[in-house]
C-alpha cells in the first residue's frame, strides 16, 4: 500500500514537471523562432567551415578534381625543416617566415596605434572646442571603405606622380622615382602606417567609453589635494583604464594576427613574399594567381594558424591579468 502511494506521488510529481516544462517551452517558442535565422547562419558560416577545414586538411584537393586522402602530409609540409634546406620556396619557409612578419606587424602596429588612440581619446574628452568635429575626423577612416582607402594610398605612393612620394623625394628622404611599394622594408612600413591610420579611430572610441566611466569626483578630489594633470593621468586615469586597456590591446592584437593588412591591395604580398602575412599566405593558397589552388594545404595551414592565435591570446591574457587589478 505504501509503495503504491509513493508511486502515485512520484507519478504526479513527474507529470507536474512535464506540464511545467511544456508550458515553459510554449512561452519561449517565439524567442526560439526569432533566434532560428541567427542560429542557421551561425552553423552555416561558422560551424560548417570549421568542419570543412578539419576534413579537407587531410586531403590533397584543388577544388576541381576528386580529393585524394593524404593523411597528415599537409601538416608535415609545415614542419619539414629538411625541405627548407633543399627548396627556398618550401611551405615550411614561407609559412613560418610569414608568422615572423605577422608578429612584427602586430607589434609595430599595436605599439603605434594604441597610444595614438588613447591620447586622441583624451583630447576629444577634454574641454577643447570642436571636440565633436575632431572625434568625427579621427573616426572617419573607419567609416570609409578600406578597399578605396588602400587604392588611394597606392596612388599617393606612386613613384612617378604620387603626392607623398614626390614630397619625400623633395625632402631628400628617398631618391627621385623611388618605388616605396617595390622594396620590402618600405612597403612593410607603409602598410603598417596605412592600417594604423584606418583603424586607430575604433580603438579611440573604446578608450572614450572607458574614460567617460571614470567617476568625476575622483579627479575633483585629486585636484583639491593638489594633483596636476600629469599626476592625475599617471595615478588615476591609467590605473582605472587597466581592464579596458587589456581588452582593447587583446582585440587589436588578435585583429593583427588574423589580418591580411593593406598588403592585399598594395603589394599582394610582394615583393618576393616580403609583405605576405600569414592569413594572406593562406588566402593565396586558396585563391592563387596563375597556379592551381591548394585547398587541402590551405585548410591545414588555417587550422595550425588558428591554434597559434589561440595560444598567443591565452598567453597574453595570462601575462596581462594584473591589469585587471592595477
Image: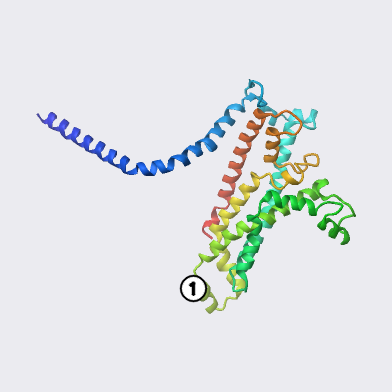
Give the quadrant of the N terminus. top left
Which residue is at a point 40% across and 41% down the rendered structure image? Answer: 33
Task: Judge left or right: residue 100 versus residue 47.
Answer: right
Give the quadrant of the C terminus. bottom right
Image quadrant in which you'd find residue 140: bottom right
Front-lying residue, 324 or 19:
19
Seen as rendered, the residue at the extreme right is: 176
Front-lying residue, 124 or 289:
289
Image quadrant in which you'd find residue 199: bottom right
Residue 257, visible in the rendered structure:
yes
Q: Residue 142, relative to residue 307: is it above or below?
A: below
* Position in image of residue 7 (x %, y %): 17, 30
Task: Judge left or right: residue 234 versus residue 19.
Answer: right
Seen as rendered, the residue at the extreme left is: 1
Which residue is at a point 70% across and 33% down the rendered structure image? Answer: 285
Snapshot colouring: rainbow
Q: Residue 310, relative to residue 83: is it above or below?
A: below
Task: Judge left or right: residue 199 versus residue 18.
Answer: right
* Position in image of residue 158 (x %, y %): 82, 51
Total labels: the figure holds 1
Residue 189, visible in the rendered structure:
no
Q: Residue 48, relative to residue 271: is it above or below?
A: above
* Position in image of residue 212 (x %, y %): 53, 66
Which residue is at a point 49% across and 69% down the rendered structure image? Answer: 215
Regarding mark 1 in the picture, which secondary structure is present there?
helix
Report which residue position mark 1 lands on: 217
Which residue is at a point 56% across and 78% down the rendered structure image? Answer: 226
* Position in image of residue 270 (x %, y %): 78, 41
Callout 1: 10 Å neighbours few (<14), some, many (20+)? few
Amino acid at each position: 500500500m505504501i509503495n503504491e502511494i509513493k508511486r502515485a506521488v512520484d507519478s504526479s510529481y513527474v507529470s507536474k514537471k512535464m506540464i511545467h516544462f511544456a508550458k515553459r517551452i510554449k512561452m519561449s517558442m517565439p524567442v526560439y523562432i526569432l533566434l532560428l535565422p541567427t542560429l542557421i547562419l551561425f552553423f552555416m558560416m561558422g560551424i560548417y567551415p570549421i568542419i570543412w577545414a578539419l576534413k579537407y586538411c587531410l586531403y590533397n584537393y584543388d577544388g576541381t578534381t576528386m580529393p585524394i586522402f593524404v593523411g597528415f602530409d599537409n601538416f608535415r609540409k609545415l614542419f619539414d625543416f629538411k625541405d627548407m634546406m633543399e627548396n627556398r620556396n618550401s611551405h615550411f619557409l614561407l609559412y613560418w617566415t610569414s608568422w615572423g612578419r605577422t608578429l612584427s606587424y602586430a607589434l609595430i602596429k599595436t605599439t603605434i596605434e594604441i597610444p595614438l588612440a588613447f591620447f586622441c581619446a583624451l583630447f576629444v574628452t577634454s574641454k577643447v572646442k570642436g571636440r565633436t568635429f575632431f572625434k568625427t575626423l579621427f573616426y572617419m577612416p573607419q567609416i570609409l571603405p578600406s578597399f578605396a582607402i588602400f587604392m588611394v594610398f597606392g596612388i599617393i605612393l606612386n613613384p612617378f606622380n604620387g603626392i607623398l612620394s614626390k614630397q619625400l623625394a623633395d625632402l631628400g628622404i628617398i631618391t627621385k622615382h623611388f618605388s616605396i611599394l617595390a622594396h620590402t622594408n618600405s612597403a612593410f612600413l607603409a602598410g603598417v602606417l596605412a592600417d594604423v591610420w584606418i583603424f586607430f579611430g575604433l580603438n579611440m572610441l573604446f578608450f572614450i567609453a572607458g574614460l567617460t566611466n571614470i567617476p568625476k569626483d575622483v579627479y575633483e578630489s585629486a585636484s583639491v589635494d593638489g594633483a596636476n594633470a600629469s599626476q592625475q593621468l599617471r595615478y588615476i586615469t591609467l590605473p582605472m583604464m587597466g581592464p579596458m586597456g587589456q581588452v582593447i590591446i587583446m582585440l587589436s592584437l588578435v585583429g593583427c594576427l588574423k589580418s591580411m593588412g593593406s598588403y592585399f591591395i598594395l603589394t599582394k604580398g610582394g615583393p618576393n613574399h616580403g609583405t605576405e602575412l600569414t592569413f594572406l599566405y593562406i588566402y593565396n593558397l586558396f585563391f592563387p594567381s596563375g597556379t592551381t589552388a591548394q585547398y587541402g594545404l590551405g585548410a591545414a595551414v588555417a587550422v595550425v594558424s588558428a591554434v597559434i592565435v589561440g595560444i598567443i591570446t591565452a598567453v597574453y591574457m595570462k601575462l596581462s591579468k594584473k591589469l585587471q587589478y592595477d
